[in-house]
Amino acid sequence: MKYTPANPQLYIENRQRFAKKLKPNSLAVFNSNDIMPTSADGTMMFIQNTDIFYLSGIDQEESILVIFPDAKDESNREILFLKETNEHIAVWEGHKYTKQEATATSGIKKIYWMKDFFTVFNALMSQAEYVYLNTNEHTRAFVEVETRDARFVKFCKERYPLHNYQRSAPIMHELRAIKSKYEVETMQQACNITEKGFRRLLGFVKPGVMEYEIEAELIHEFIRNRSRGFAYGPIIASGASACVLHYTENNKECKAGDVILLDVAAEYGNYASDLTRCIPISGKFTQRQKEVYNAVLRVMRAAIKMLVVGNNFANYNRAVGKLMEEELIGLGLLKANEVANQNPEMPLYKKYFMHGTSHFLGLDVHDVGSFQRTFEAGMVFTCEPGIYIPEEGLGIRLEDDILITESGPINLMANIPIEADEIEKLMAR
């Protein structure tokens, strides 16, 4: 990894919080992600399963974490199983964790090599009554490949059919929604790297530049600051492409007079940031572009003020929708009388603002967490209203990352330029 490892206290505290949620005499197992194949002998870049990372900090393939708070032998209450290295692996793949390094990273003292897993696990299962297994239960996940976790669920139920099986995912969703100070520090670092990338672009974007050249500038800045790269597939959408919400082709020429929508952000230490900015390719917004831009900015700033302890998504989205209706009427895109008589189940603003305003952010860009849960201190959300007008070839979305605290929202991207006038001044340098 390129990043500086976090304080192991983060993972120690995360395991303690998880263990408190288990039934008595329970054992929980977490698997690393697979290295995914492409074709021939190719593989994709390894990205660790965020649950095992959250609980251990171990960022390596072929790893298993076992948590057994009531194990009779206290040394077996937290165990890591790791891929054992050798001279051949060292030459072809590079360095792997030593047992000492794994302990320093995770705070876990009991480390075994993977070859010992089934023997040790069999002995532990004879003591356990409940077994917590992990699955991807993200509401937007559609998983077609069989993961290591899925294979392990099959193995356990075939080998140990009489144990009482439980789901770890609900606990992980509950815990991961609240960020610790260590996590917020890491996410702030991701936001700071994103800021460097965005500022770099303000002196680079001009008519004739290709969208993929902008992507290249960003990845250069991100990696040179110890990021793995983009936290998600970058959206670099000029002109009418900005009205395609998940545009990722990034292959068009930036034309004079158009606005380019940049939904691009860095990760750091496996934690995501998530930024959207819109900038005028020629260096100055037209009057109409600035009107739409400022309308979105007003909605964004009002929405951020509502990201407070005690609010909830239902009330929040309803209020943001009302704000958007007012702005769209002011822009001449909706008529007040039609809005007054609209079907409340199918609000008219959805024609121009069809996505949600916020989502959880953390180890995943669409991080786990319940949208039925009341907002609490420690949650981190995006705030990303937008107005998309295909007939004008214009899409404007603005997005920052917001930490909820007891004393109000904190914008982790407050230093990233967002005012239309400031962006024009920076581009004119």
Image (cartoon, rainbow, N blue to C red):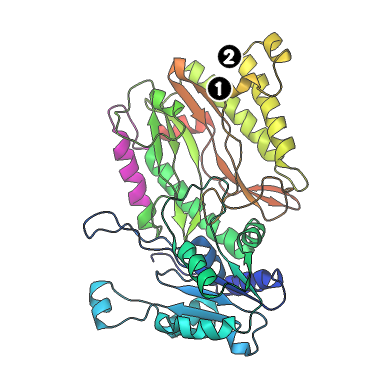
Question: Where residue 200 appears, x then y in whole percent?
Answer: 38, 43
Question: Where residue 407 appears, x then y in whole percent?
Answer: 75, 51
Question: Where residue 266 appears, x then y in whole percent?
Answer: 44, 51
Q: Residue at x 67, y 20 (%)?
A: 326
Q: How many tags in the picture? A: 2
Image position of 428 (left or right of 40): right
Q: Which mark is residue 333?
A: 2
Vertical placement of 13 versus 189: above or below? Answer: below
Q: Looking at the image, do the residues carrying marks 2 and 1 touch, with CB atoms under 8 Å apart?
A: yes
Image position of 180 (left or right of 290): right
Classed neighbour count for the residue bearing mark 1: other residues with Cα under 10 Å, few (<14), some (14–19), many (≥20): some
User: Which image quadrant is residue 343 in?
Assistant: top right
Q: Which mark is residue 352?
A: 1
Q: Quadrant of the N terminus?
A: bottom left
- Spatial CA span between label 2 and label 1: 8 Å
Q: Residue furthest bottom?
A: 73
Q: Which residues are magenta?
A: 203-221
Q: Residue at x 72, y 37 (%)?
A: 314
Residue 266 visible within the image? yes
Residue 6 visible within the image? no
Image position of 144 (left or right of 406): left
* Residue in the foreground of this view, choosing between 352 and 185: 352
User: Which image quadrant is residue 217 in?
Assistant: top left
Q: Earlier in the sequence, mark 2 or mark 1?
A: 2
Indicate the amino acid at tag 1: Tyr
Residue 212 in magenta stretch: yes
Indicate the amino acid at tag 2: Leu
Vertical placement of 91 versus 47: above or below? Answer: below
